[in-house]
């Protein structure tokens, strides 16, 4: 270890915290990943994601960063520290895994936070998922990464053929608020959360829309209490237990621009009981990758529809109110034109 390594490791330890920092100079690259061939001049964005440990546990000799994330013009590279289920190094004490994904192959990006538990999932066309965990207080840095992935290169039409909508229900036009839309059932003015507990979902959308004026809300629904499907005598018992501990379908907002569909909501679509929900979720799907949509009634609850969005071998699952604008739009979203 040379004198520059000692200096940079000392600075790394002194600056360590829960935040996701951008790497701009070679001295800011965590020591663990310094042997990786990284060209900061050609990278669009480089982020280092810290370990979930306390400041007291952050000794100078400890590898402090779980991930180094590199976005280049055509690729995403994620370096991840080797660790076992307890978070301790596995095998080689200072080893790391390297995952590389072509931006053309990214079919969905899902960012979700529950208090300080943040998780980012990058879905690829072959069904693989590149995931990383982070401290929820550092979500701003991760949102920068999401935006970089959103602006990835467009993929030309491939051999998969035309996208298909679910033929189970006639196509419905998109609301007028969407680009090229024709229906009038939904307007931005109707974005009234109603329940104060749903304000955060609308706020998440508005925060993103301030940076992207072309992103327009096309559907919104607040949280709704669901009733179990009756199944004979057992159905009566289920209804009784649900009076004491109801199942709630969480609020969600759908938005789109000329190239992407975005879904803002909660980490879990269905939540049982009366506990408050503090989670947040943002699902981003390029319209060019969306091939097929399947919608079917939820098998356990009335007035709820399970929707599966298929992009390549990736399958994204949502639950929305039956008969809602969100359901109608999702059913035909695979046919929306993409710029």
Image: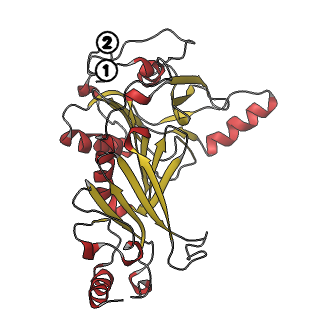
Which numbered disc covers residue 166?
none
Name the residue rendered at 29%, 33% in the picture. 192
Point out which mark residue 183 bears. 2
Instruction: Assess disc 1: are there few (<14), some (14-19) or many (≥20) residues with their C-alpha within 10 Å of its C-alpha.
Output: some
Q: Which quarter of the picture shows residue 93? A: bottom right
Residue 283 rendering spot, x and y as whole percentages: 41, 40
Which residue, as the protein is rendered here, is positioned at the far front? 37
Residue at coordinates 33% horizontally, 33% vertically from top-left?
154
Image quadrant where residue 15 sits: bottom left
Q: Is disc 2 in contact with disc 1, using a CB cutoff of under 8 Å? A: yes
Q: Answer with left or right where residue 145 lies relative to residue 234.
A: left
In the structure shown, which secondary structural element does the residue marked by tag 2 occupy?
A: loop
| Residue 144 visible in image | yes
Q: Picture coordinates of residue 62 (x, y %)? A: 44, 83
Q: Is residue 216 above or below residue 136?
A: above
Is any part of residue 107 visible from this angle? no
Determine which residue is flagged by label 1: 186
**Which SS class for mark 1?**
loop
Q: What whole-number distance in Å separates the C-alpha atoms at marks 2 and 1? A: 8 Å
What quarter of the picture does the C terminus occupy? top left
Q: Residue at x 45, y 77 (%)?
A: 53
Outermost residue, top side: 170
Where is 311 relative to 24, above or below? above
Where on the picture, by quarter, is residue 88? bottom right
- Which residue occupies 42% across, 22% down? 333
Which x, y percent locates residue 277? Answer: 46, 51
């Amino acid at each position: 270890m040379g004198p520059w390594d000692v200096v940079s490791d000392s600075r790394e330890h002194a600056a360590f915290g829960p935040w996701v920092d951008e790497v701009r100079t070679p001295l800011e690259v965590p020591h663990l990943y310094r042997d990786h061939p990284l060209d900061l001049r050609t990278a669009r964005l480089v982020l280092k994601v810290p370990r979930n440990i306390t400041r007291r546990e952050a000794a100078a000799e400890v590898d402090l960063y779980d991930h180094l994330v590199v976005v280049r013009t055509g690729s995403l590279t994620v370096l991840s520290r080797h660790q076992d289920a307890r978070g301790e190094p596995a095998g080689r004490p200072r080893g790391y895994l390297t995952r590389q994904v072509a931006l053309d192959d990214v079919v969905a990006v899902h960012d979700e936070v529950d208090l300080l538990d943040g998780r980012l999932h990058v879905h690829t066309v072959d069904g693989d998922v590149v995931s990383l965990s982070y401290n929820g207080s550092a979500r701003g840095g991760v949102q920068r990464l999401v935006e970089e992935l959103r602006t990835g290169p467009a993929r030309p039409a491939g051999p998969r053929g035309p996208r298909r909508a679910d033929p189970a229900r006639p196509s419905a036009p998109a609301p007028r608020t969407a680009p090229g839309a024709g229906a009038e059932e939904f307007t931005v003015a109707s974005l009234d959360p109603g329940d104060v507990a749903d304000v955060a979902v609308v706020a998440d959308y508005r925060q993103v829309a301030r940076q992207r004026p072309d992103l327009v809300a096309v559907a919104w629904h607040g949280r709704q209490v669901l009733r179990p499907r009756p199944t004979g005598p057992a159905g009566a018992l289920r209804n009784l237990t649900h009076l004491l501990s109801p199942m709630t379908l969480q609020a969600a907002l759908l938005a789109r621009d000329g190239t992407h569909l975005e879904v803002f909501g909660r980490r879990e679509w269905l939540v049982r009981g009366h506990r408050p929900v503090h989670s947040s979720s943002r699902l981003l799907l390029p319209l060019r990758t969306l091939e097929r949509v399947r919608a079917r009634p939820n098998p356990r609850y009335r007035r709820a529809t399970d929707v599966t969005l298929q992009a390549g071998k990736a399958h994204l699952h949502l639950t929305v109110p039956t008969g809602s604008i969100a359901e109608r739009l999702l059913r035909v979203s695979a046919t929306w034109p993409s710029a």
